Image (tube, rainbow, N blue to C red):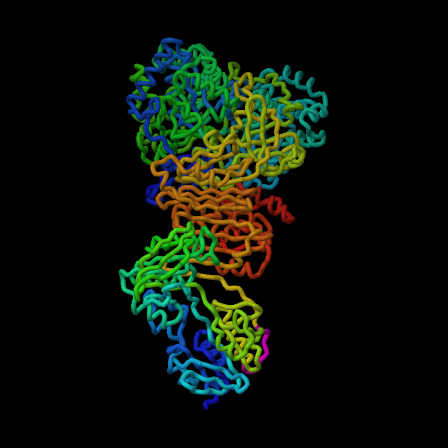
Amino acid sequence: MTARRLLIIGNGMAATRLLDELLARGMSGSDIAVVGEEDAHGYNRIALSPWLAGEKSLEQLITHDAEWYAAHDIALYLADPVVSVAIAKREVCLASGRVLAWQQLVFATGSRATRLSIPGHDLAGVNVFRSLADAEAIAATAVAGQRAVVIGGGLLGLEAAWGLRQRGLEVSVVHNGEWLMNRQLDAEAGALLAQALNARGIALHFGARSEAFVGDGELAGLRLRLSAGQEQILPCELAIMSLGITPEMSLAISAGLRCARAICVDAWLRSSAENVFALGECCEIDGESFGLVAPIYQQAKILADTLIGVCNLGYRRIASPTRLKVTGIDLFSAGELHDLADCKSIAWRDTQRGHYRRLWFRHHQLIAAVLFGDVDDGGAFFDVIEQGLPVADPVALMLTGSAA
Amino acid sequence: MADIKTTCPYCGVGCGVTATTSEAGVSVRGDESHPANNGRLCVKGSALGDTVGLERRLLYPQVDGLRASWDHAAQQIARRMQDTIKRYGPDAVAFYVSGQLLTEDYYVANKLMKGFIGSANIDTNSRLCMSTAVAAHKQIFGSDSVPGCYEDLELADLVILVGSNMAWTHPVVYQRIIAAKKARPSLQIVVIDPRRTATADSADSHLQLTPGSDGYLFDGLLAYAIANDHLDHEFIAAHTDGFAAMAAACSARNASLAVTATATGLSEVALDAFYAQVCATPKTVTVFSQGINQAAAGVDNASAILQCHLALGQIGKSGAGAFSMTGQPNAMGGREVGGLANQLAAHMDILKPEHRDLVSRFWQTADLAPRPGLKAVDMFEAMASGKIRFVWIIATNPLVSLPDANRVRDALIACDCVVVSDCVDDTDTLRLADIRLPAAGWGEKDGTVTNSERCISRQRAFLPLPGEAKPDWWALSQVAKHLGHAQAFDYSNSAAIFREHAALSAFENNGSRDFNIGALATCSDADYDALMPVQWPMPIAKPEGTARLFSDGHFFTASGRAQFIDAHPQAAKTSSPNLPFLLNSGRIRDQWHTMTRTGRSARLLSHIAEPFIALHPDDLAQIGAEHEQLLSVHNSFGECVVPAMADSGIARGHAFMPIHWSASNASQARVGSLVAPLCDPVSGQPAFKQSPVAITPLRSQWQGILISRVALQLPENQYWCRHDIGVWQIYTLMGARLPVSAELMALWQGTEAHPASRKWASLDDALGLRHHIIGYDNEQPVLWFLAQPERPRIDEVWLLDALSQNQLSARELSRGVPSTGSDTSALVCSCHQVRSQRLLDAITDGHRSVEALGACTRAGTNCGSCIPELKKLLAEQMFVVSPNPEVML
């Protein structure tokens, strides 16, 4: 039995960031073991879309390669997932049968892509787009001229759609909502985005519910139920489900950790069991779960402190703006777009350049901002939202990014 | 790249200008060798280079709306004129000309009308400006003679400025006085004006009298001089007639100072001090201008001033005299050729048979007009009533400048044929023309002008004639030829006209007439081209010219003596409960007349770009209005709608409006539409200065700026004013209901060639604060609009440049100021483009005098006309101002 002081389950971006933070705090790599489910070293998941689009190489994706782990003397177990965790014995068991002991255990198991369990979901050609392996599988089968369907008009779905389009596929996006990225955009920005995607050769279907993948062994089409009730079959040879993520907590549940939507931790990332921690997409703090990188990087710092016994203030909720960059389309969104009932908005439309920006105010406070085409002032709006101070001249703020 | 010496086309100072033409454009500087300005220029003159572009120039003749050849146009004018004469006689034809004409143009117009058409119906816009001074000079001196010269203003011990905001309207002469005072602080300046103007700021005393009471003030001075025996008995006895009768009447009217005090609204103490000062100062010059001339009893007012100088012997001597400052660059030249309806030519009198005979023989005509023609206001009234059926208007815009301007519009509409010669393609008057003739503009004209001190200078061309534009003398001669007078109008150039004019002045003169420039009658073309500025008279025996007239005590009356007359003052118009305000009018610092030229210079517009009505702050409060709020100014003649300007220099119950705005550049700001057609009975000069009006505040919910390079329909029933910079038209708007962006975009979608291609950037403001629209045609910004409840402040220079460059996004253009920040505070120094914020910063940094501010910011160091404003800023910042400001000239 191998024993190192700290064992991290998972080798995704949360885990590698935690490693960086620990090493920066002087912890020795020889005290650390990492177990990865995937057969890949540390890579930047955010860059998978540009990689799929052919805009980035594999080398550009890898952040922590084998040499790095070796150089820091970190024990790394790849393609050998943990199958059970014995909290009381302070051991984990890997699929290979290997047993690892630990004094401190970190769950960094991340999340899985949400799948539709509709008929035909197991046909060849039906994919999710989450891991490097997913991306590689898609890239291996996607052929220019093929027809592809992306289910889900959210950020990741659109990035995947653009990636496939860049590879020369005929791409359709099927979206349940009334407009694209409906959690981050208002209807007008969504319409501008749709227009821009159309112009780039991506077909869009709104208010469409996916009912079944059809095909005989191999995918041949997707059957949709349209909002008006009628049925439509989109012929396709490739499908990607991009319907969000589900925190990966099955191991934690079976280990007896308290879980809700994800593994419950406190502001210092401590789980319900002593010396057991969780961070990243697999955890939740006060009911908040995570999908964006900024809060997870914050968690990595806090957890590194916790693990070496340094006091800090703990996790504090931070909002994050959304930025989408699909070659030539700049988008920015920040604030509480789901709760604008009593807000008044101002907008700036530039049909000459296809720019749009809208700000929502409640009692002189900036609540939310959506920018399309010209995102220069996104950061400034985000700061104003976060500061929550009254805005004296909303129009000036909108036009210049400065409230002065 | 040659330097050409010419003269400025604006005010009556008549400054010499050196113009340099290069690929970069035209640059100008003051001509150091010209005696009027010795190298100085005011801000308007300095900006002349900005005004010579060919945008909005009239370049081709048009007949009945169609482009025509010059020959066809001249033929049509001649034919329509002949038809009119055949049916209604020669008095049914009129010329209305201008103090903007060169002497040669003026001479030919006058010769054609009075000598060959046979009517004296030629009058000029100098009627609105100088005819009172002309009439006063003639009745007192026997001739229209300005006795002194500019140098007298520097040599005097006391300069009285009456009815003149000289600091703004004649800045270069004003700066000469200020410079003289600096060198010799004992030189006293007294300003007499119902307004406290920029001119009053540098004066030793300001007599803020009741408007229109100047006559009482000078009548009182005569009575004081008589009562206290300050008279020059020797001069009166030797060189004047009628003193005793005049003195008796004057003394009877002015039994005590209290009488004058009541009439003028001044205290007896102030009057006593002023009168004592004048009587004790032999070297006194009284400069009078429009405040005296533009009055119902203007000739009496001006005569009272002249008579004071005669009685005190303060005339014909260096540093003493009465000095009439003319408004226009060639009002004097026009008078010399007889451009007024009651003159003949060369200062001869149309009522004198011997003069008519002399001129008939000289011109070799049998058709000389037998009697005076109609003066300007009567002339247009005769058009309205159908007596005059044909009019040719040259280089002036009577629809804006004449009183009861709405009636003038009716008059032109009633005419069978209206011919208008102008150098620009759109004026209120041009819009009513049947035939439009493209005239040469400044820089293209070649001839002579005479300034206020009788100095004849050359205006020389340094630019080619654009399109088919022609000098006015040429157009007049073409028509004369079509009328059958080829021989009398066979001029090869302006020099030939000038020689004839000079020869007529000397013809059978023998010292009987003041105007004699016989020394120039035989000048060659080369001599004419090289002519140096010279003051008339310059008879053959005295080619060096004459600085001062009447030094020998000889006057050009039948007796050779000056005439005292009973010039009894009259009360000016008064307000009434229905019309509680008396409206004054005049020029502002950086504009000239109807802005057809100065309105094209961005830097001149940056001082004041909008019409306004100035009122005392307490009056504004009393009518329930605020500074910059829209006001309706109205009486039975018309209405103007303009923003208010709070001005504590205006007396309670009075108001002031600038004269520059017309129907082509403002919705409703023609001050002339409020002025009664009431004229001085002798001079026919209208009383512009005291029009009774009512003033009512209007509610405006929004104020906006519209900048466009395409023609746009404006939202209805809104106030607007416009100025043009290059290809851009800049509108300021105010209105009761904020127009919705969508409505404006629908209105402005346009009816042009590619309406569908217009794209928009616009603000959608659910908070209801602001409306922004930017319109694009073919990816070029063509219109920019901003409206909001408060007055928008933009950096116009930056914005026009950014719109033209088209490198910024609509959002970056939308606020109208650069993102790096911009000073949009009021412009103070137009010459060096210094704004008030920069000056306030400099004051804060310790630059606490006019001199220090000038050294730090350059403000006030060129023309000096902003120095009163610099002093005001300093005073507002609670700093003591030195009594003798450094003027860096």
Task: Out of B789 and B195, give the one closest to the viewer.
Answer: B789
What residue sits 34% from the left and 27% below the top? B494
Q: Provide residue B748's location: percent of width, then percent of height.
A: 43, 37
Task: Out of B419 and B301, give the one closest to the viewer.
Answer: B419
Q: Provide residue A204's location: percent of width, then percent of height.
A: 37, 54
User: Residue B514 vs residue A233: left or right?
Assistant: right
The quadrant where residue B727 appears = top left
Residue A313 in sight here: yes
Task: Out of B164 and B146, give the one closest to the viewer.
Answer: B164
Position of residue A146 relative to residue B799, above or below, is: below
User: Residue B134 vs residue B278: left or right?
Assistant: left
Q: Provide residue A238's location: percent of width, then percent of height.
A: 32, 63
Tell me where the magenta segment starts and ends, as one range. A307-314
Residue closest to the far bottom: A1
The quadrant where residue B570 appears = top right
Position of residue A26 relative to residue B7, above or below, is: below
What residue sits 39% from the left and 28% below the top? B422
Task: Out of A81 and B756, give the one closest to the viewer.
Answer: A81
Residue B381, magenta (yes or no): no
Q: Quadrant of the N terminus of chain B?
A: top left
Q: Main secondary structure of the magenta part?
A: loop
Q: Provide residue A402's location: percent of width, then percent of height.
A: 52, 55
Residue B842 in sight here: no
What residue sits 51% from the left and 49% below the top? A346
What residue sits 27% from the left and 60% below the top? A145
